[in-house]
């Protein structure tokens, strides 16, 4: 059965959608959609990628120092390149494209410094890119001379559009140009002094290229390089401009994966960009479709809308219980270094790393998070395990912020969208006071009134000030004095008395004898950390038949109970 909302099929024209159920009729926008055509990918009726699952991390290659760098307003200078390189090493990247040394003196010098100053760990491979032009290839080999492990990465665009408008050449000519470049690289690689030299080929604009031609050109490249045991080749399939939905990219990758010869000697790599905003999805589906390796940048820096974001990709694996093989445990430091090197801010809502992504303002989210965290603590206590090793299950928080080096401090922030639980969470975590549920309702209205009138966020210091002003500051009707010999001094409506101070109930009985209509419904008592350690008492009372709360904090528990009841009477008169 067809999808009732479908507006096109692959062969027919676009027709306006007419959703039958809601009665809504959508009108054509008048935008010039007729100028654009979908790219026709390979026909792959028996695709296998949809039923696969990602169970392990791919090989990662950071291209921050090349593709990310070439997209910056001010490309990185040497100190910034070193800073980012060191950060990538700390995170555990083992393949790092460090530049385009034939294109810029800075990149050339950077590669030379890495090699000459012995800055490349023995298990790390640097990668350098070059166009298919002899003088640029020769200069590239000069740059990597003496490198212990290096990948020379050759690219040239093979799409029909670029063949026509950039190179003014047909398929044959482009293949010759490519093969000539690979011959030169093969020769220079054989002469390479130093260590291991590997080769990567990218048919640039792969996603906009006829599949049979992309395959033909990769086969021609391999005929020259002759990949074999111990002599692999990296075939990198770039979505230079992301121009297909992620599922179609997956089809393209699976098609290549199945058709490439010598597959066992190929590291099949993908290089997604993010023009449609689906770079991460494209990379994930490409891995299901047979790719072994992903090239991308931290936080999705790169040309236009960026390269695929390696942080999101890696953390997506992590959140499914798969070790990403990259260390994101200090995400704020990674973000700080990336921002310093690229001079680009990371969005506050950036997945896993943005300033606001572990923060809830809205009441129902805060309530669920608070309950989830409480349940986690109980579960850890019952199992006798460390909270950090307890299976994670907190609503609205896909991962434990502590796993990326964040604290719980910013999880709940209060504004006019917040409810009782957020306010209660702040009082509990910042001041150690666990409000009884009905008091949470009462006090959250005080906070709500304040946030609506100020139209701002209410920080935890303000919540505490509001709490003190509401519950802990004496008013005019009833004030307590010293307690002595089981009795407490009271000033009620301007008259001095001494009443029994045994507990809240006895004190309330004394007040009733003085004509105050007060009943104690419940007293909640809890210890509060501090110097000296104190007791907090929340007294649920009725005064003149009206439910009213009083709160007191005091080192002496009995005095705190009396004081809380006095507070309720005093508040009722305000
Ligand atoms: C998708 C990608 O990210 S690819 C990487 C792109 N990165 C960069 O371009 C950053 C660094 N680039 C540069 O500094 C320069 O472009 C250089 C040094 C590589 C070349 O500079 P120039 O010779 O001045 O050429 P220009 O910058 O105008 O590049 C266009 C020329 O390169 C040719 N070209 C583009 N790509 C390739 C390629 N992969 N192989 C061979 N020639 C190519 C074009 O056909 C054009 O040649 P033409 O002038 O004869 O028509
Ligand atoms: C792999 C290279 C050439 C690239 O950056 C791209 O095609 O996007
Ligand atoms: Mg790119």
Image (cartoon, grey):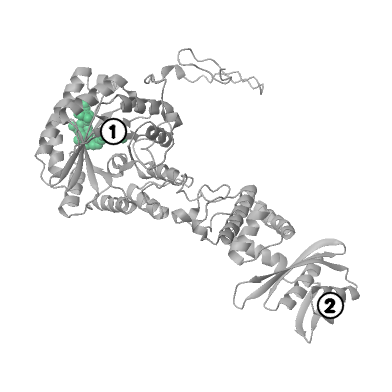
The picture quadrant for ligand 2 comes to: top left
Could you tell me which secondary element the residue under label 1 belongs to?
A: strand
Determine if residue 169 is in view.
no
The answer for how far apart the CA atoms under marks 1 and 2 are is 87 Å
Q: Residue furthest bottom?
A: 485
Neighbourhood count class around disc 1 (C-alpha, 10 Å): few under 14, some 14–19, many 20 upward? many
Q: Is residue 483 visible?
A: yes
Disc 1, ligand 2: is the CB inside 8 Å?
yes
* Residue with the mark numbered 1: 236
**What residue appears at the point 30 percent right and 31 percent down from the top-left corner?**
237
Residue 66: percent from the left, percent from the top?
27, 41
On the image, which quarter does residue 263 sit in?
top left
Please tell me in which quadrant of the rendered image residue 302 appears: top left
Q: Quadrant of the N terminus?
A: top right
Q: Which residue is mark 2?
A: 494
> What is the x, y in percent for residue 154?
21, 33
Q: Residue 508: percent from the left, percent from the top?
A: 84, 73
């Amino acid at each position: 059965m067809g999808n009732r909302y479908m507006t096109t099929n692959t062969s027919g024209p676009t027709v306006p959608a007419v959703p039958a159920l809601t009665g809504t009729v959508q009108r054509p926008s008048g935008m010039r959609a007729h100028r654009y055509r979908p790219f026709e990918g390979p026909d792959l009726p028996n695709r296998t990628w949809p039923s696969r699952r990602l169970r392990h991390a791919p090989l990662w290659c950071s291209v921050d120092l090349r593709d990310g760098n070439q997209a910056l307003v001010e490309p990185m200078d040497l100190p910034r390149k070193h800073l980012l390189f060191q950060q990538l090493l700390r995170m555990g990247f083992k393949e790092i494209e460090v530049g385009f040394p034939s294109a810029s003196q800075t990149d050339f010098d950077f590669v030379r410094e890495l090699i000459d100053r012995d800055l490349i760990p023995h298990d790390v491979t640097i990668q350098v890119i070059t166009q298919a032009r002899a003088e640029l290839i020769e200069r590239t080999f000069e740059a990597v001379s003496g490198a212990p492990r290096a990948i020379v990465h050759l690219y040239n665009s093979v799409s029909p559009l670029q063949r026509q408008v950039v190179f003014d050449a047909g398929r044959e000519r482009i293949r010759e140009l490519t093969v000539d470049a690979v011959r030169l690289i093969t020769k220079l690689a054989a002469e390479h002094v130093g260590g291991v030299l590997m080769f990567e080929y990218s048919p640039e604009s792969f996603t906009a290229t006829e599949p049979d031609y992309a395959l033909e050109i990769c086969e021609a490249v391999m005929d020259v390089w002759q990949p074999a045991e111990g002599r692999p080749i990296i075939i990198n399939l770039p979505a230079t401009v992301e121009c297909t939905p992620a599922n179609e990219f997956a089809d393209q990758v699976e098609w290549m994966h199945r058709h490439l010869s010598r597959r066992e000697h190929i590291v099949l790599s993908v290089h997604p960009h993010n023009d449609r905003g689906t770079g991460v999805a494209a990379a994930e589906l490409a891995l299901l479709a047979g790719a072994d390796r992903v090239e991308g940048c931290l936080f999705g820096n790169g040309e236009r809308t960026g390269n695929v974001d390696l942080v999101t990709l890696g953390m997506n694996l992590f959140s499914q219980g798969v070790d990403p093989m990259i260390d994101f445990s200090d995400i704020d430091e990674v973000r700080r270094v990336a921002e310093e090197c690229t001079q680009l801010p990371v969005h506050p809502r950036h997945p896993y790393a943005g300033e606001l992504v572990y923060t809830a303002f809205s009441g129902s989210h805060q309530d669920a998070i608070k309950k989830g965290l409480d349940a986690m603590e109980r579960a850890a206590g019952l199992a006798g395990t460390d909270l950090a090793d307890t299976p994670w299950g907190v609503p609205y928080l896909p991962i434990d912020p502590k796993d990326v080096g964040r604290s719980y401090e910013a999880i709940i922030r209060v504004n006019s969208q917040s409810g009782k639980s957020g306010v209660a969470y702040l009082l509990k975590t910042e001041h150690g006071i666990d409000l009884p549920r009905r008091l949470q309702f009462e006090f959250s209205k005080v906070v709500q009134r304040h946030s609506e009138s100020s139209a701002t966020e209410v920080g935890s210091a303000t919540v505490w000030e509001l709490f003190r002003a509401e519950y802990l500051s004496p008013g005019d009707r009833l004030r307590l004095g010293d307690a002595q010999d089981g009795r407490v001094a009271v000033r009620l409506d301007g008259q001095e008395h001494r009443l029994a101070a045994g507990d809240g109930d006895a004190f309330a009985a004394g007040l009733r004898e003085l004509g105050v209509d007060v009943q104690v419904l419940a007293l909640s008592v809890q210890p509060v950390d501090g110097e000296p350690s104190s007791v907090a008492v929340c007294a649920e009372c009725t005064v003149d038949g009206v439910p009213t709360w009083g709160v007191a904090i005091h080192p002496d528990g009995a005095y705190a109970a009396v004081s809380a009841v006095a507070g309720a009477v005093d508040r009722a008169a305000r």
